[in-house]
Image (cartoon, rainbow, N blue to C red):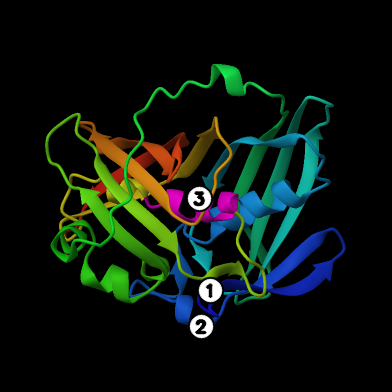
Amino acid sequence: MTDAALYRLLGRDGDAELFVPPPPTDGPGGPTHRGGPAPPLLGRAPDRHEPRPDTRLARVTIELLGPVPISQVRVRTHIERPGRKIELLGAELDALMPDGQWRRCATGSAWRLACQDTSDVVWDAAKPQQLLDDASPSALAELFPSAWLEYGFVGTIDWRISRRSHTPGEPTLAWTDLRCAVVEGEEPSPLERLLAVSDTANGVGARLDPTQFTFLNTELTVHLHQAPTGRWVGIEAETSVGADGIANSSGILHAESGPVGRVNQSVLVERITS
């Protein structure tokens, strides 16, 4: 991991944590994020909020209400539905706007479930996938425009493209390693790493030319039947595009040890006209 981070923790303001991003996270589209750093922050918050032993987050949903400015942000967390075995947590991410007002940019919800030993009945619906030793530069260049890799959030990830397909039913498989911290001075947890890269599933699974179309996801939902482990996260994704500009990106999430969950995103598809 490099010394870089997506955010630096400034401190607390009442029940909120305050963060500021470093300038290098800016991108060619202007001083905003679409998603990127928001999911790991909104996953980090409930995961650390009043943690209890023998529980973990089983589902995390992030609603992206709009672009997140490259500015100070605050994150609040609360328990919406307390419970000993089943607990629902919520989080909100607000950004400080140039006029000094705070704007809600994203929200998150997470189900925290009690754990028990079921190691004798483990079953994975998906096949495990192998992490390659090296990357395919040509496959990576086909997946993302060079500007995406040089600027902004996508460029903070190491990529290894194991499989690139244009055949329906054959998803692209990309292995990802977040090179930087989510919060400066903190080692990212496996959950934070997974949530950070899961937001790229609509790009990994895209079957559209990114120079001809935009495909922005409005949300991100991750279900985890296994606890994430390690640095590398495999994203085995494919996007289905409807006839009216609406798409769905769906994928399987892998650790090196095997499948750990699934990701789904609703996607707005638009033609680039200029």
Q: Which residues are magenta?
A: 190-200
Residue designated by label 1: 70
Choose the circle earlier in sequence order: 3 or 2: 2
Q: Is residue 41 above or below residue 165?
A: below
Name the side, left or right, on which 134 lies relative to 98. left
x and y percentages locating residue 91 in the rendered image: 70, 48
Q: Is residue 15 left or right of residue 244?
A: right
Residue at the front extreme? 120
Q: Position of residue 28 (x, y in %)?
A: 33, 75
- Dot 1 falls on a residue whose secondary structure is loop
Residue placed under numbered mark 3 in the picture: 194
- Residue 254 seen in the current view: yes
Looking at the picture, which amino acid does disc 2 mark? Pro
Tags 1 and 2 in contact by the CB under 8 Å rule?
Answer: yes
Residue type, numbered disc 1: Ile
State which quarter of the image contains the C terminus. Answer: bottom left
Residue under the point 55% across and 53% down: 39
Work out how far the residue at label 3 is from the one at label 1, CA to CA, in angstroms. Answer: 22 Å
